[in-house]
Image (cartoon, rainbow, N blue to C red):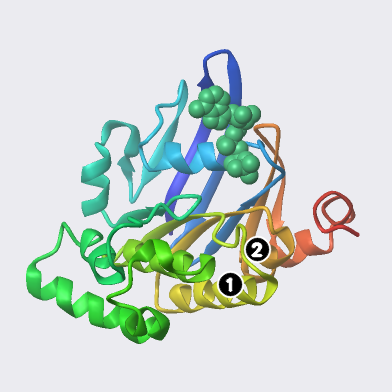
Amino acid sequence: MKILEVESLNVYYGAIHAVKNVNFFIKKGEIVSLIGANGAGKTTILKTVSGLIKPKSGEISYKGLDVLKTKPYELVNLKLAHTPEGRKIFTELTVEENLEMGAYTLTNDKMHENIKKMYDMFPRLKERKKQLAGTMSGGEQQMLAIARSLMSEPEVLLLDEPSMGLAPLLVQEIFEIIKMINKKGVTILLVEQNANQALSISDRAYVLETGEIILNGSGEELLNNSMVKKAYLGG
Ligand code: ATP
């Protein structure tokens, strides 16, 4: 079942045509990646799907619902969550307070239940629950950003460059976490510059170049595609 479908999407910033006639879909339970170089339009697509940017034309349907006619805060209730690029956590709040901020649609009991779940999933956050988020390492902040998104119990998680700026060992850890979240039943749309890692964990992926999808296939197919190897895998 297609849980999210994007058709003929066009997004402009003034005169810049950032997303050109983009079509893609995600089936329930999948990990799907959008890969591509800097400025290819990946972030713009995620922001458009989560209602933060209005496209010039196109259709986005989420669980059969017309996203472009739905307000962003209503999308939260529809269990679609977005972890933005650059870990937009609240640096002056503690880890636990950040998690609470992710739970504004929940009852108090549910919030505490979910904070406990997040601490089970991310023991490092539990150890640091009273620490100011801004003083944590890059990897820990990324974990917190993901955990905060999961507080609202999304069915679909949009993840923007979770590995950005992390040391190789932590990159590995973040991708393991993404796989684990998916195994728990969350459908994932992943935007990454780290094509190798992203394709390795993806069921399917789309390759974007200057706003256009130029290729799509299973993660494995794309890992073995000579054009992808040359342009994105350094081979
Ligand atoms: P990166 O991996 O570097 O984040 P990206 O694939 O996510 O790149 P986008 O951030 O979606 O790419 O940008 C797509 C294009 O739109 C780029 O040419 C970018 O300069 C342009 N762009 C993005 N945001 C704006 C904005 N607010 N105003 C004008 N142009 C923008």
- Residue 157 in view: yes
**CA–CA distance in space, label 2 to label 1:** 8 Å
Instruction: For mark 2, give the secondary structure.
Output: helix
Q: Are marks 2 and 1 in contact (CB under 8 Å)?
A: yes
Name the residue at 53% across, 75% down: 179
Type of the residue with mark 1: Phe
163, above or below 39, in the image: below
Q: Which residue is drawn at 58% across and 77% down?
A: 173
Disc 1 is placed on an element classified as helix
Residue 43, image quadrant:
top right
Q: Position of residue 45 (x, y in %)?
A: 51, 39
Q: Is residue 199 left or right of residue 32?
A: right
- Residue 107 placement, left or right of 116: left
Q: Nearer the viewer, residue 163 or 67?
A: 163
Give the labeled residue for mark 2: 198
| Disc 1 Cβ-to-ligand 1 distance below 8 Å | no
Most distant residue in the left direction: 108
First along the sequence among labels 2 and 1: 1
Residue 155 in view (yes/no): no
Residue found at x 66% / y 69%: 167
- Residue 127 x/y as whole percent: 35, 85
On whether ligand 1 comes within 8 Å of the CB at mark 2, the answer is no
Write the residue at 33% across / 67% down. Answer: 132
Figure quadrant of residue 214: top right
- In the rendered image, the quadrant that contains the C terminus is bottom right
Instruction: Name the residue tied to disc 1.
Output: 175
Image height of 3 relative to 187, above or below: above
